[in-house]
């Protein structure tokens, strides 16, 4: 039986994977190398899996220019677990931490931290429906760390510059991780659910600097202690997800690394935003200076037209363009693996749809 055609995938997460990686996985799925079994069936203590983790860490270090002072962890439970695990480790009893709330996931991160202690909202764009990235708050920081979300998948905003503060930054980079270079020096910890940009759902990559790790609270539950995971392979990791991540990392290196992928992402976003801004029929929802290169959000003149747009787009092979249920509208997620050709197909459909309905 022939495969069904592969369509244009704009899903916000789990997002598109590189076609080359998907084909490699299919080829290797019955038997991984000389293991005699699928990668889903091998021991996480085996030499094969150990080599996978080592290769993944080495690729991350090369891509990010990361030194030995950084620990690289592959944890389960998704980025949402990090909303609790970060303050559990680093929000000192009797102390404070600062949170910048720029979207629903940043708000959830703050809510979890507030369950554990004094988590201050140092800045928020909630009053403007999360349509911009607040600035001018940096001198108001009083906590031991600042938590921020680098890219907001729902409302389509993104930090263009890393916040400049005098305490370690903790970043939820789930939806733009490895879409561009990262200023590591400013951060104590970076975490990212893989399913947006570097792999399938099931694994969260955590990067934690050794000096920041040394500041964590003690004692902690073993599974929630970053130090336990930094010291050894404590429990069964999400083997299959790490296996795919390793392939995506090598794919990124083959594309020229993070500076090259940033240029490609910038070009894709510029094309799509250019079409949105060309007429009054489509209207971007995020402030232009803060627009995301990963999640492009826009509206049409009426909700009825938006519903029709999503339905007809799917008939044209353009998948998952419906905006998040909390805000509506249209959202095109154009992560690393979304090819320029898919963006051009979307623009062509936008031209067609406006000509018919404008």
Image (cartoon, grey):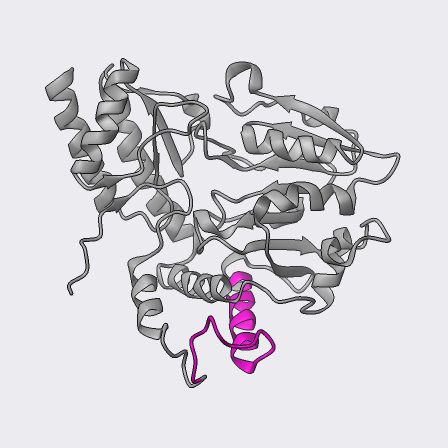
**Residue depicted at 53% across the width and 25% down the height:** 133
Along the line of sight, the residue nearer the viewer: 263 or 23: 23
Is residue 41 shown to the viewer in this render? yes
**Residue depicted at 77% across the width and 47% down the height:** 89
**Residue depicted at 75% across the width and 59% down the height:** 227
Magenta stretch encompasses residue 139: no
From the viewer's perspective, is residue 250 above or below residue 171? below
User: In which quarter of the view is residue 50 placed?
Assistant: bottom right
Magenta stretch encompasses residue 40: yes
User: In which quarter of the view is residue 97 placed?
Assistant: top right
Q: Is residue 128 toward the left or the right of residue 156 in the image?
A: right
Q: Is residue 203 toward the left or the right of residue 270 in the image?
A: right
Q: Kindly give the residue lying farthest to the right in the view shown.
A: 94
User: In which quarter of the view is residue 198 placed?
Assistant: bottom left
Which quarter of the figure is the C terminus placed in?
top left
Q: Position of residue 333 (x, y in %)?
A: 36, 39
Residue numbers of the magenta segment: 36-61
């Amino acid at each position: 039986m022939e495969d069904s055609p592969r369509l244009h995938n704009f899903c916000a997460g789990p997002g598109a994977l590189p076609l080359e990686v998907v084909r490699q996985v299919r080829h290797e799925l019955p038997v991984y190398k000389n293991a005699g079994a699928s990668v889903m069936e091998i021991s996480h203590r085996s030499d094969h899996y150990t080599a996978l983790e080592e290769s993944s860490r080495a690729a991350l270090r090369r891509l990010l220019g990361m030194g030995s002072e950084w620990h690289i962890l592959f944890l389960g439970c998704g980025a949402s677990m990090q909303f609790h695990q970060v303050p559990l480790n680093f929000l000192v009893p009797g102390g404070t931490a600062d949170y910048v709330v720029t979207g629903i996931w940043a708000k959830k991160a703050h809510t979890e931290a507030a369950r554990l202690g004094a988590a201050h909202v140092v800045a928020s764009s909630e009053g403007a429906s999360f349509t911009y990235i607040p600035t001018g708050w940096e001198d108001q920081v009083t906590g031991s760390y600042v938590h921020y979300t680098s890219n907001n998948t729902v409302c389509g905003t993104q930090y263009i510059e890393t916040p400049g503060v005098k305490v370690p930054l903790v970043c939820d980079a789930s939806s733009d991780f490895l879409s561009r270079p990262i200023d590591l020096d400013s951060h104590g910890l970076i975490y990212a659910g893989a399913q947006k940009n570097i792999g399938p759902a099931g694994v969260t990559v955590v990067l934690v600097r050794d000096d920041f790790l040394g500041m964590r609270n003690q004692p902690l539950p073993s599974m929630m202690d970053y130090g336990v995971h930094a010291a050894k392979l404590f429990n069964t990791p999400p083997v299959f997800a790490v296996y795919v991540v390793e392939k995506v990392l090598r794919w990124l290196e083959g594309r020229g690394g993070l500076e090259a992928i940033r240029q490609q992402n910038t070009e894709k976003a510029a094309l799509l935003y250019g079409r949105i801004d060309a007429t009054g029929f489509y209207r971007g929802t995020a402030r232009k200076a803060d627009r995301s290169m990963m999640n492009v959000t826009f509206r049409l003149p009426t909700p009825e037209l938006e519903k029709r747009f999503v339905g007809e787009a799917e008939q044209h092979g353009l998948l998952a363009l419906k905006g998040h249920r909390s805000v509506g509208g249209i959202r095109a997620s154009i992560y690393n693996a979304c090819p320029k050709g898919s963006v051009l197909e979307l623009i062509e459909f936008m031209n067609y749809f406006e000509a018919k309905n404008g």
